[in-house]
Image (tube, rainbow, N blue to C red):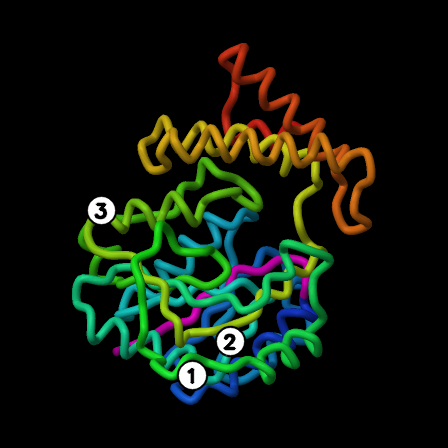
Amino acid sequence: MRIAIGIATRGRPEILAGMLGHLRRQTRAPERIIVCHVAPEDVAGCDSIPGVAFITAEAGLPRQRNAILDAAADCDLVLFLDDDFLCAPEYLAVTEAAFAARPDMVVSTGTVIADGAKGPGYSLAEGAALLAADAPPADRMAMAPHFNGYGCNMAFRMATVRAHGIRVDERLPLYAWYEDIDVTRRLGRHGSIMRLAGARGVHLGVKGGRVKQLRLGYSQVVNPIYLARKGTFPWSHAIPSVARHCLANLVRSLRPEPWADRPGRLKGNIIGLWDLLRGRAAPERILDL
């Protein structure tokens, strides 16, 4: 298989450089590594790394990932990785073997052994140490059906992407909350989505380069409802998702974590709920906030 690794990045060149260096440890090298950035400073110090193609797109995760899909149109698989995701050395080899063994599989997502997005995050050194200490399963090809691909590490079968004109929804701007659910659930209409036990990695969850928290709070409310209306996210998931995030931001605003602007998120939640009541809610509204 011809495999491309696609990385959308903005504003984190040091993390990107460390992640690209870590990719050299793969036992099965990709045919292509494509980095999509917005401005030259996004890849400062990285553009001399050999074996990496750098392309540009307008700001926004969906636009950048669509540019990667276009650039990798001649490939069989595209593995999307966040610029702060560290793969275990066997990650790509396991992914290739899984797609070869399961012709029905259209999306794979790996096993995240530690996710810094749920806390203060990890440094590159901490992430590497977590990977080194990990004990992979005896059956590296074990897999199980999964609801969606997790955006920090998800692979697409490009034949399905091409056959059905699948694109990442550009109505979800900037950080694009839940864009991974939307695009992988649309792909999943044409085959299976599997979680691979042997494709392992650490999501550092670096906080730099993210959108401001008020915008995130708005997206936490509006994006699930938009996707439910679109038919890619069941209402039985969308309503609990909105309620869960609003409640968490309300409670934790009393004693917010140092790494999270809970009051900002809560304010965004409230604006999103008010927009829903007024019939004005739209994912693009975060561009005005």
Q: Does the magenta stretch include residue 231?
A: no
Q: How crowded is mark 2: few (under 14 residues within 10 Å), some or many (20 or more)?
A: many
Q: What stretch is highlighted in magenta?
A: 1-12
Across and down, in percent, residue 64 comes to: 48, 54
Q: In the drawing, what numbered circle is on residue 253?
A: none
Residue type at numbered disc 1: Glu
Quarter-of-image position of residue 5: bottom left
Q: Residues within 10 Å of mark 3 (few under 14, many from 20)?
A: few
Residue 21 higher or lower than 165, as above or below? below
* Residue in the image at 82% along x and 39% along y: 255
Q: Describe residue 121's horizontal placement relative to residue 5 as left or right.
A: right
Q: Describe residue 242's horizontal placement relative to residue 235 as left or right.
A: right
* Residue in the image at 53% along x and 31% along y: 242
Q: Mark 3 points at which residue?
A: 189
Q: Name the residue under label 1.
A: 90
Q: Residues within 10 Å of mark 1 (few under 14, many from 20)?
A: some
Residue 285 higher or lower than 198, as above or below? above
Residue type at numbered disc 2: Cys
Quarter placement of the C terminus: top right
Q: Is mark 2 on a helix, strand or loop?
A: strand
Q: Name the residue under label 2.
A: 87
Quarter-of-image position of residue 192: bottom left
Q: Is residue 5 magenta?
A: yes
Across and down, in percent, residue 182 comes to: 38, 43
